[in-house]
């Protein structure tokens, strides 16, 4: 039993008054919240005097890609070090189950992390395997539409029959009944991009019947941003499903559309359509290097894609140069596991091309060939003013769009992996003063918990789980940069997960996370 006293308490509610008080923790639950002096606390309780530090609910990251890295880095240092106590993975249409016909594809990705065996086929089996792995954070999971589609019809643009749709509906319903948080769409990626509105509506109706959520990496975040938002709104409008637009942005040629995009979402909300969004506070995205390829090369499995792009590289390189893409000096390699490519982590395509003495497009194809898989890449695509505008919208919550890592991991991740939440406070509350501290904390706690139907988390209240972050507001600062992305943040003093002190003095000291079957 534990008492945390003399803290400035942020409840997680929007605009709530910040008051000095204490909380009482018994096992994994907040037993009481007290706003008066504790002169003679129960001697059976351990007492920690926080001496004016801030105390709030543990942060909730609803957009994570930790499906496999959670097994490699169960401590989840990147998350805990910035105050995150709960993540939702399985986003963008990608999940690692159901896994029958596609197990080879999943193993190919897993092998990059040193994982050689996948002892699961269903989400239930995945959860059981995760429950046998002591993890540092609470972990919820979305089932990926792209993964379900690949299981049923593969990765090609095949016309969906009624029988196919019945099979997809069965897999979706089974995953939701097994405890998946909802369904994630990745309509910019293969095979999700082949889905029709009728297919998406049919599946969304199933999600609605289970009172769960649909998330969407939209078909476009640039040239067709407005149309992609309209499609998202239509899915929710036609089905009534709880809908989340993932990592909202106006990227590339879409720069200048952020305000119009947000107004479109606001109008939908005013009409009673249940739609919201999340965002990371950076002007660069992170996805596969393969996204610079013209779309017709992206159809099929990874093996098929690699085979296609290595057969006639000179011709394909010419196509790449003609197809609109981010400037080569604005694309940085962040993830590669072939030792031959280690030296290129953190370098731009332009720099790597100079080292390889190849044209940039040929360099891209050479990198894919050497890795024999996709590489992670950071793309500088957004205008910072538009990033800030989106961040301050009432319907936008915070999410990292990253995967859990430890500081000793061999990757060169986007700085959002180690810095999203501390950056949000440091930049938007302290530096720019665009949000109050209560507003910022709400976007990271109760707002995502409510939207994703995560019970009894995201709020400092009696009876809620004791997921808690304690921080020094004056010192809160993100230190992760594009050149040194695994630096831990300052100012996060303590993190409690399910009532257990899990992070202190910039180190993970306990692994107390739970698998959330929702």
Image (spheres, rainbow, N blue to C red):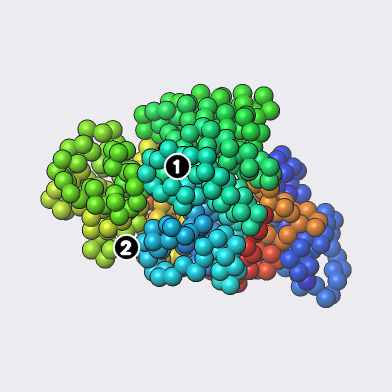
Q: x%, y% of residue 361?
A: 20, 43
Give percent across and percent down for residue 11: 73, 49
Label 2, label 1: how far apart the Cα atoms are: 26 Å
Query: Observer-nearest residue: 446 or 48?
Result: 446
Q: Are marks 2 and 1 in contact (CB under 8 Å)?
A: no
Q: Quadrant of the C terminus?
A: bottom right
Q: Name the image quarter holding the N terminus.
A: bottom right
Image location (x, y in percent) of residue 198: 53, 33
Please tell me how crowded label 2 is: few (under 14), some (14-19), or many (20+) other residues with Cα within 10 Å: many
Residue 263 placement (x, y as % from top left): 56, 24
Residue at figure coordinates x 60%, y 54% from the top left: 175
Question: Picture quarter containing residue 345?
Answer: bottom left
Query: Depth check: 509 or 273 in front?
Result: 273
- The residue wearing badge 2 is 337
* Res 32 visible: yes
Q: How many marks?
A: 2
Secondary structure beneath label 2: loop
Q: Is residue 220 above or below residue 147?
A: above
Q: Nearer the viewer, mark 2 or mark 1?
A: 1
Residue in the foreground of this view, choosing between 464 and 288: 288
Query: Considering depth in this image, is 457 or 433 the residue closer to the camera?
Result: 457
Q: Residue at x 68, y 59 (%)?
A: 467
- Residue behind mark 1: 192
Residue found at x 63% / y 57%: 178
Determine whether the residue tagged by mark 1 lies in a helix, strand or loop. helix
Q: Is residue 45 above or below residue 100?
A: below
Please state if 233 lies on the left or on the right of 210 as rendered.
left
Instruction: Compare marks 2 and 1 and give the one earlier in the sequence.
Output: 1
């Amino acid at each position: 039993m534990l008492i945390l006293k003399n803290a400035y308490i942020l409840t997680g509610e929007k605009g709530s008054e910040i008051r000095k008080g204490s909380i009482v923790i018994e096992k994994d639950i907040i037993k009481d919240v007290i706003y008066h002096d504790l002169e003679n606390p129960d001697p059976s309780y351990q007492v920690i005097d926080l001496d004016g530090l801030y105390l709030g609910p543990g942060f909730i990251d609803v957009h994570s890609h930790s499906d496999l890295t959670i097994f490699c880095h169960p401590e989840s240092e990147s998350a805990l070090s910035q105050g995150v106590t709960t993540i939702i993975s399985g986003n963008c249409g990608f999940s690692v189950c159901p896994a029958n016909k596609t197990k080879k594809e999943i193993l190919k990705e897993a092998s990059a992390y040193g994982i050689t065996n996948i002892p699961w086929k269903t989400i239930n089996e995945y959860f059981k395997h995760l429950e046998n792995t002591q993890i540092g954070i609470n972990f919820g999971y979305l089932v990926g539409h792209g993964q379900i589609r690949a299981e049923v019809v593969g990765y090609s643009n095949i016309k969906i029959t009624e029988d196919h749709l019945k099979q997809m509906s069965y897999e979706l319903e089974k995953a939701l009944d097994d405890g998946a948080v909802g369904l994630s769409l990745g309509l910019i990626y293969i095979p999700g991009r082949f889905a029709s509105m009728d297919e998406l509506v049919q599946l969304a109706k199933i999600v609605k019947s289970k009172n769960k959520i649909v998330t969407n990496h939209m078909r476009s975040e640039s040239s067709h941003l407005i149309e992609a938002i309209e499609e998202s709104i239509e899915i929710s409008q036609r089905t009534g499903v709880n809908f989340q637009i993932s990592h909202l942005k106006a990227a590339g040629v879409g720069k200048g559309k952020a305000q119009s995009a947000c107004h479109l979402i606001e109008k939908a909300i005013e009409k009673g359509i249940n739609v919201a969004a999340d965002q990371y506070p950076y002007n660069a995205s992170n996805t596969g290097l393969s996204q610079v390829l013209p779309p017709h090369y992206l159809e099929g499995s990874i093996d098929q894609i690699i085979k296609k792009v290595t057969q006639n590289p000179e011709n394909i390189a010419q196509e790449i140069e003609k197809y609109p893409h981010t400037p080569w000096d604005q694309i940085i390699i962040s993830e590669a596991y072939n030792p031959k490519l280690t030296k290129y982590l953190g370098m731009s395509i332009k720099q790597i091309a100079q080292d390889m003495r190849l044209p940039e497009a040929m360099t891209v194809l050479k990198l894919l060939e050497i890795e024999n898989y996709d590489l992670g890449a950071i793309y500088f695509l957004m205008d910072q003013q538009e990033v800030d505008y989106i961040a301050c919208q009432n319907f936008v919550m915070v999410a990292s769009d990253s995967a859990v890592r430890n500081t000793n991991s061999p990757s060169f991740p986007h700085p959002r992996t180690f810095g999203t939440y501390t950056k949000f406070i440091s930049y938007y509350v302290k530096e720019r003063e665009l949000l109050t501290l209560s507003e910022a904390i709400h976007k990271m706690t109760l707002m995502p918990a409510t939207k994703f139907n995560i019970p009894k988390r995201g709020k400092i209240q009696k009876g809620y789980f004791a997921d808690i972050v304690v921080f020094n507001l004056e010192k809160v600062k993100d230190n992760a940069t594009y050149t040194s992305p695994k630096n831990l943040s300052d100012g996060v003093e303590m993190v409690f997960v399910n009532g257990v002190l899990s992070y202190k003095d910039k180190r993970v000291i306990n692994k107390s996370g739970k698998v959330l079957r929702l």
